[in-house]
Image (tube, grey):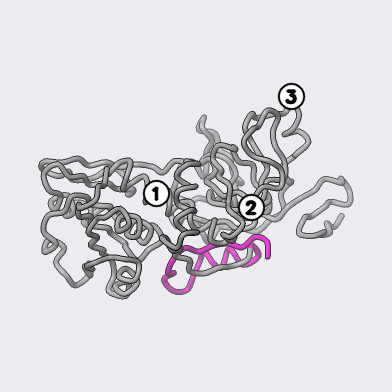
Amino acid sequence: MDDIVHGGMVRGLDTGRCRMKAIVVTDQAAGTAGMTLVERPEPDAARLASLTGANYGDVVVEVHASGFTWDELEWPSTWTDRLGRDRTPSIPGHELAGVVTALSYGTTGLSVGQRVFGLTDWTRDGTLAEYAVVEARNLAPLPGDVDFTAGASLVMPGLTAWQGLFEHGRLRAGQSVLVHGAAGAVGSMATQLAREAGAYVIGTGRAAGRQTALDFGAQEFVDLENDALEDVGGVDLVFDVFGGDIGRRSAGLVRAGGTLVTIAGPPEARPADGLAIDFVVVPDRPQLSEIVQRVRDGRLRTNIGNVATLDDAVAAFNPTKRAKGKTIIRVRP
């Protein structure tokens, strides 16, 4: 029997069960080209709220805007759960902004109807859907003067930049930092946060990104295709998003006592007299609150590129030309 759509929700006429639109993936080899828009059961709010069905601390979020990380389909957690079992068809996407619609038994700190944004668990269905189940501790309140598109765009780039600079890199005022990919979603956040912290920022990237990196606060720019990276000289901190040859060469630029921080996997080279740290971003409510407050104050700008609907998400993640900024899926108008 056919399904009909009511206000964005799909209700099966034969079962009475609410359904929702979602992007799913089933074939790792297909990459983003294997993404498909389907109908999936809506999270069962009644079961969530019951004592017997509760996963303590979970909330249902009506997703208004969602983000997707470009290499997400290469992560093992997209395809298997914590016990290594296949979990396809899985819903990708881990960044969201939306409204809480249901609370699990015993959940505190959030309320139904509250605007929130945050990062979902890696091994659970994600945010490229009309509804998502998220641990409450992974969410922060989204102020009413920050729209959902901006909120979703801040989550992964903001937390990655914050944790790389301040937790792992221990950046202090007066230090110098080399930010790779400074025109990108993560790099532009790192550039702004580092400048605000009183650091001297050298950005890198393709020549086409020079002006963008400078606009976001980089004081110098290195064109990685045409300039000599080694001409930078010594820096206190390298924030690396590339790895590979760039990461190896960057290790030699770190001053004694400095740090190379990377999100590109285990570093292939280490500073002669410093640290090399690779990390995976983690949810953090206080950090999200710090980041969004900077947006409200005008101290931090988002780097949003293409904004597409859920119906157009598959095409948005398979662009015909290089995407600039963070691609956001606006799930609801």
Mark toward the viewer: 3 or 2: 2
Q: Quadrant of residue 107?
A: top right
Report if residue 46 lies within the magenta region. Answer: no
Q: Residue at x 22, y 50 (%)?
A: 237
Q: In the image, which disc is placed on residue 98?
A: 2
Give the quadrant of the N terminus: bottom right
Q: Quadrant of residue 44?
A: top right
- SS at badge 1: helix
Mark 1 lies on residue: 160
Up the image or down, 172 lies above or below 200; here it is above
- SS at badge 2: strand
Q: Residue at x 74, y 24 (%)?
A: 52
Mark 2 surroundings within 10 Å by alpha-carbon count, few (fewer than 14), some (14 through 19), many (20 or more) = many
Q: Which residue is more in the foreground, 259 or 31? A: 259
Tag 1: amino acid:
Thr
The earlier-in-sequence mark between 1 and 2 is 2
Report if residue 332 lies within the magenta region. Answer: yes
